[in-house]
Image (cartoon, rainbow, N blue to C red):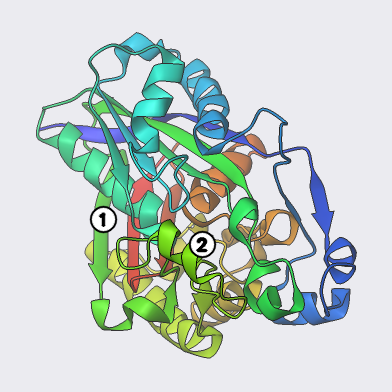
């Protein structure tokens, strides 16, 4: 049998800084309103014609991850690209990243599980390696939210939350069965699919229909969120799936060296910290700086935690996410 472990990490954050005060000039909101409800102080948005896109940000993060893994792009056997904001309706961003990396004939797959996308993608990569099919897999989360947000007072409940960015990891075959990914746990409940969603443009609401109808009150092409319901389910599902990871590996919360949650809302992370009685040093948050970068949030946070020396060889780490779908999941690993 084989084990899989992360051998390289990288991130890319756009230069364009957008503060809460910047947003208050576009919509009826304040610094205090945003911080109180989300914990977010600033985020990054790509700018038109700055050379960035979902795939290009992923490329920049991937180059760093490959360099740190000390392998070339030609050694990648599979690309798994998690995003809710692909460059095109089709094809997926995975093949665009493949083109940028100049990898020939490597399979590329897009994972569309939104905030849980990176957990789903890493779980999938882990299984491909453990079965012996592949040796090195590039797993990426990248999001360009800013181009599709309603930056008016009408959309403030959603638009203040999201930021742009990308994170990437190289997952490689490991012969030592006592390190790497130990377990993964993924779930979904489709009955809540529309509580956090973007309904159109889609095959139910084509762009041609939106243009034809020209209805100023039609906001189906902007994301919508039932915030109270999402929060309620998030704290329950986060707790369940973290507890499952602990039980599976005979760990207690005291054994966790670092919990890296999806950066959805600082209040959710604080709830989880209190529930599991975690010290500040056991939890990593960067939502204050970047907002919610959806599929990119965990790989960005994991990369930063590693860069800051919060993860070292032998560290026990849990990754956890909850998001649209509803979907949720966790991964436990020993660094």
Q: Which quadrant, please, contains the C terminus? A: top left
Disc 1 designates what residue? 184
Specify few, some or many for label 1: CA neighbours under 10 Å numbering under 14, 14-19, or 20 or more. Answer: many
Q: Position of residue 208 (x, y in %)?
A: 42, 58
Q: Position of residue 169 (x, y in %)?
A: 44, 34
Q: Position of residue 199 (x, y in %)?
A: 41, 70
- Do labels 2 and 1 touch, CB within 8 Å? no
Question: Reading the chain from its start, which is encountered first: label 2 or label 1?
Answer: 1
Q: Which mark is residue 39?
A: none
- Give the spatial CA distance, label 2 vs label 1: 44 Å
Identified at 26% across, 83% down, the residue is 191
Q: Give above or below for 95 relative to 150.
A: above
Identified at 28% across, 70% down, the residue is 244
Disc 2 designates what residue? 211
Q: Residue 264: which quarter of the image?
A: bottom right
Which label lies toward us, 2 or 1?
A: 2
Identified at 42% across, 26% down, the residue is 97
Specify few, some or many for label 2: CA neighbours under 10 Å numbering under 14, 14-19, or 20 or more. Answer: few
Label 1 sits on a secondary structure element that is: strand
User: Residue 233: in sight, yes or no?
Assistant: yes
Q: Nearer the viewer, residue 327 or 162?
A: 162
Q: Give above or below for 233 relative to 210.
A: below
């Amino acid at each position: 049998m084989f084990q899989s472990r992360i051998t390289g990490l990288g991130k890319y954050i756009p230069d364009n800084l957008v503060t809460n005060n910047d947003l208050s000039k576009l919509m009826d909101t304040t610094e205090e309103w945003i911080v109180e409800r989300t914990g977010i102080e600033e985020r990054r948005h790509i700018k038109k014609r700055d050379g960035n896109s979902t795939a290009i940000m992923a490329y920049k993060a991937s180059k760093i991850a490959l360099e740190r893994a000390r392998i070339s792009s030609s050694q990648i056997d599979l690309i798994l690209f998690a995003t809710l904001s692909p460059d095109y309706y089709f094809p997926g961003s995975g093949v665009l990243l493949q083109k940028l990396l100049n990898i020939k004939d490597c399979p590329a797959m897009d994972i569309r599980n939104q905030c849980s996308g990176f957990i789903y993608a890493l779980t999938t990569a882990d299984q491909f390696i453990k079965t012996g099919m592949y040796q090195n897999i590039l797993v990426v989360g990248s999001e360009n939210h800013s181009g599709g947000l309603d930056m008016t007072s009408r959309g403030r409940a959603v638009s203040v939350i999201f930021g742009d960015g990308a994170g990437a990891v190289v997952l490689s075959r490991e012969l030592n069965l006592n390190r790497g990914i130990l377990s993964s746990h993924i779930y979904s409940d489709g009955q809540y699919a529309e509580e956090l969603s973007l309904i159109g443009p889609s095959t139910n609401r084509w762009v041609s229909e939106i243009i034809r109808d020209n209805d100023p009150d039609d906001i189906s092409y902007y994301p919508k969120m039932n915030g109270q319901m999402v929060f309620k389910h998030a704290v329950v599902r986060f707790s369940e799936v973290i507890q499952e990871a602990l039980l599976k590996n005979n760990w207690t919360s005291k054994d966790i060296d670092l919990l890296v949650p999806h950066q959805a809302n600082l209040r959710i992370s604080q709830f989880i910290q209190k529930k599991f009685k975690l010290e500040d040093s056991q939890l990593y948050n960067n939502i204050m700086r970047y907002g919610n970068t959806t599929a990119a949030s965990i790989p960005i946070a994991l990369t930063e935690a590693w860069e800051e020396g919060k993860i070292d060889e032998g560290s026990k780490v849990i990754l956890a996410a909850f998001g649209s779908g509803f979907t949720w999941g966790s991964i436990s690993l020993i660094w």
